[in-house]
Image: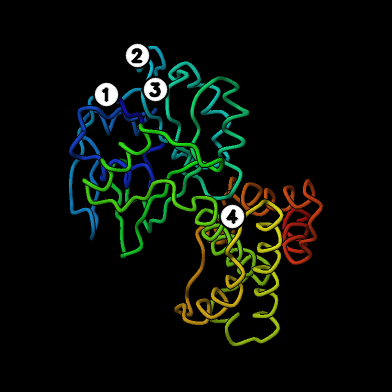
Amino acid sequence: MKIAILGLGAVGATVAGGLKKYEKNLIFIARGETKKVLKREGLFLESEKLGNQRIQPGLVSDDPKEIGLVDVLFLCSKSYGLETACQKYRDIIGENTLVVPLQNGIMSSRYVSDWLNKKCVVSDSFIYCFSNIVEKGHVINRGELLRIGIGFADGKDNEKAKQLVAMLNEGGLPSDYGQDIMKALWEKYAMMCGNSCAFIYFDCEAGEIQKDTKKMEFLRGIYEDILRLAKASGVKGMEEMPDKYYQHFLTLPPQTISSLYRDIREGKEETEFEWVVGGGCKLAQELGVLVPYMKKVYEGKAGK
């Protein structure tokens, strides 16, 4: 199976680590200095669960003609670069190619399908991983929370996706196929978006929110917004989420922040705010769902 990974940062490197056994079937899509480093040294991943390993792919390239058609394409770039990436690499995707987007948010598969505008198989998918880039070609993955989910909202079966999940599990990266994919995807979104909204709105770390009853009730309101949005999208079985996540937030170390809030706090020009928070608000408008707490966060940040 010819597997391409676009975006060799924290997520892409972690996926590559799970496919180390099949490294000669891997294609790393990278450009600039990252491409030079990966060609010269391969990719070094430090991981508690996957082990420390250097992955030497069969090809490192940013040329669609050199890459050719692939069987699987993992989209691991940041959301704000996803549309450009889809346009540039449309020609490596055939009608039997499985495209696996692993961005934060709940609209990735829909947007990717629209941008590619061609017959291919786009999965609904997510990843949990605590990884960060040390330098180009060197990524550290920490913690026990490491998991990939791949499936399809319409419940269709796909043998290639099943085979891919088996390969990832074989490489030590816990992966699931198909089971309640949309519920699992929305549960991740609820925690990531919900917590980020609170951090962004109050501009502080978890500890400052935990000790303020009004701030905690605002956080619960965001979780409830997301629950209404999930229900309107046809997702079932999340009724206990607001209380469950509220209690979980109280257990977080006081210095905890989300990666989205960190990027905003550090003043980065490009962040996933529009994709994560803006995407949820736009979906709510499309479905006619009231999300007053999320709207406050979105309008407050977007208006600055």
Residue 220 placement (x, y as % from top left): 66, 75
Which corner quadrant holds the N terminus? top left
Q: Does residue 250 appear left or right of residue 130 in this picture?
A: right
- Kindly identify which residue carries mark 3: 62
Of the image marks 3 and 4, the number of the one nearer the N terminus: 3
Q: Nearer the viewer, mark 2 or mark 4?
A: 2
Q: Secondary structure at mark 1?
A: strand
Question: Dot 1 corresponds to which residue?
Answer: 59
Circle 3: is it few (<14), some (14-19), or many (20+) Cα within 10 Å?
some
User: Which residue: 27% across, 33% down?
Assistant: 38
Alpha carbon distance from label 3 to label 2? 8 Å
Q: In the image, which disc is placed on residue 66?
A: 2
For the point 31% across and 65% down, the residue is 144
Q: Could you give the CA–CA distance between mark 2 and mark 1, rounded to whole angstroms?
A: 9 Å
Select label 4 or label 1 by which is in front. 1
> Residue 256 placed where, x, y %?
48, 72
Q: Residue at x 63, y 69 (%)?
A: 198
Tag 4 near tag 1, CB within 8 Å = no
- State the SS at label 3: loop
Residues at discs 2 and 1 in contact (Cβ within 8 Å): yes
Among the 4 quarters of the image, the one containing residue 291: bottom right
Type of residue at label 4?
Gly
- Given the image, on which type of amino acid does mark 1 rest? Leu
Q: Which residue is mark 4?
A: 267
**Mark 4 / mark 1, whichever is N-terminal:** 1
Q: CA distance from mark 2 to mark 4?
A: 37 Å
- Image spot of residue 205 (x, y percent): 55, 74
Work out how far the residue at label 3 is from the one at label 4, CA to CA, in angstroms. Answer: 29 Å
